[in-house]
Image: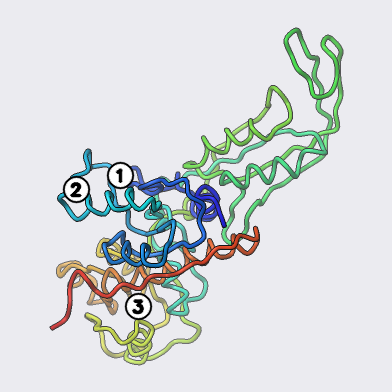
Amino acid sequence: MALPAEIYAALNDRYPFSSAYEWDNSGWQVMSGREVERCLFALDPSPEALKRAIDQDAQLIVTHHPLILPSISAIDTTTVQGSIAKLLLVSDIGLLAAHTNADRQIDGISGALADLIGLEEQQILAPDEQGTFYKLVTFVPDNYTEVLRAGLGAAGAGVIGNYEECSFTIAGIGSYRPTSGARPLVGEVGQMEHVNEQRLEMLVPGAAVDQVIEALKLHHPYDEVAFDLFQTFGQGGALGSGVIGVLPEPAETMDVLASVKEVFGGIDLQVAGPEEGEVQLVAVAGGSTSNLLAVAAARGAQLFIGGDLKYHDIMDAAGSMVCVDAGHRATEQPGVARLADVVQRAAARNHWELEVEVFLEDAAVSRVF
C-alpha cells in the first residue's frame, strides 16, 4: 500500500505541481486519508471513470484533467461535476489531477505522444517565456552533502532533461564565529571555527524556487543557512507546449499518415495539407492545440499532429505542412499511461503493494454516426 502523499510526491518529482499555469488547478481535487491499494488513472474525472474506481475498490483516481478549476467558487451537486465531487466524498475516494504541470514538461503528455509516433531528437515545440531558471549555491559540511542533495532534488532542483539530482560540488573551508543565541553544529559561542564544507550548486526552475528554499532550510544541518540564488539564461526551453522531433528516416507523406492512423488504433483522422512529398520533421501536441500550428510551421515542421484544430488555423498552416487532427482524447490518452508508469516505477522502488489501472474510456462526449 501507499499513502496518498507518497503518490503525490512521485508525480511531483517528475512533474512538479508548482509548474502548472496560474489559471490551472493541478493537484488535489478531493483528498482522502485512506491508504491506497488500487489506483485508477484516467483522462477525465468522468462518471464512467468514477464507476470503474468504485467497482474495483480503488482508493485513488489520478486524472489529467481537473474536476475543479479556479473559476468555480461553489459545488452544485445538481450538475455532473458536483455529483462526481459528492460521490467521491461519500465513497472516500481521493482525486488528484496532473494537468498543465504534465503538459509543460518535454517528457509529459506531448512527450508520450511523440514517443508513440517514434520521434527522435525531441525538443519543446513552443518554449514558455516564463521558463525562468536559477542556480542555487549553498555550503554544507562534507557529511551532509548527500542528504541535502537528495532533499533539494525531491523538491524539484537539479533536473536537466532526463537526469535528476544534477549538481556540482567543490571542497573548501567554511569559517564562522558563533555569537550569543547561536546553536552551532560545530564549534562554540565566541570562538572562531573552521569546517570542511562542500560548495553545492543545483539548477532550480523558477516555479519551484519557494519549495526548494524550504527544503534547503529543512535538510541543511546549520541553524543559519548561507545560500545564493542566481538567475540563469538559455534555460527557457525546459518548459513549454508540444514536442518537435524527427522520424528515424524520411518517409512518404501517405505512408506516415497510414502509420499514424495505425498508432491511434484506426480512428478517423482529419487531414489537411500536401499529399505528396516526404516527411521527417514532425511536431505533436496533446489536447486542444490549434494555437501551436503556426509555431510548428515557423519551425519548419512537415507534419503536425494535435487535437481540436480550428478551421482558419489549419488553412493558414496547411500550405506548408500536413495538419492532422486526431482529437483531444486520442492525443492525450498516451500521457495518462505515462502518469501511471511514473507511479508504477515509484511503487517498484519503494516496494509498495499497489495495483495500477489505466482506464480507457469510450468516447462519451461525441460519437461518429
**For residue 266, above or below residue 90:** below
Which residue is more in the foreground, 355 or 335? 355
Q: Residue at x 25, y 65 (%)?
A: 290
Give the structural element (helix, strand or loop) at label 3: loop
Badge 2 amino acid: Thr
Q: Residue at x 62, y 58 (%)?
A: 163
If you read the primary sequence from the N terminus, does the residue marked by circle 1 or circle 2 appear first? 1
Q: Which residue is mark 2?
A: 77
Where residue 34 appears, x then y in whole percent?
48, 49
Q: Is residue 347 left or right of residue 284?
A: right
Badge 1 amino acid: Trp
Callout 1 crowding tier (Cα within 10 Å): few <14, some 14–19, many ≥20: few
Q: Which residue is mark 3?
A: 302
Look at discs 3 and 2 and give the one toward the viewer.
2
If you read the primary sequence from the N terminus, does the residue marked by circle 3 or circle 1 appear first? 1
Q: Residue at x 63, y 55 (%)?
A: 164
Question: Toward which corner of the image does residue 312 lie, by quadrant?
Answer: bottom left
Look at discs 1 and 2 and give the one toward the viewer.
2
Which residue is more in the foreground, 124 or 217? 217
Indicate which disc residue 23 carries. Answer: 1
Contact check, label 3 and label 1, Cβ < 8 Å:
no
**For residue 110, above or below residue 67:** below
Where residue 107 appears, x then y in whole percent?
49, 63
Callout 3 crowding tier (Cα within 10 Å): few <14, some 14–19, many ≥20: many
Where the N terminus falls, by quadrant?
Answer: bottom right
Where the C terminus falls, by quadrant?
Answer: bottom left
Indicate which disc residue 291 carries. Answer: none
Query: Disc 3 to disc 1, how far (Cα)?
Result: 32 Å
Give the structural element (helix, strand or loop) at label 2: loop
Give the structural element (helix, strand or loop) at label 1: loop
Badge 3 amino acid: Gln
Query: Disc 1 to disc 2, how far (Cα)?
Result: 23 Å
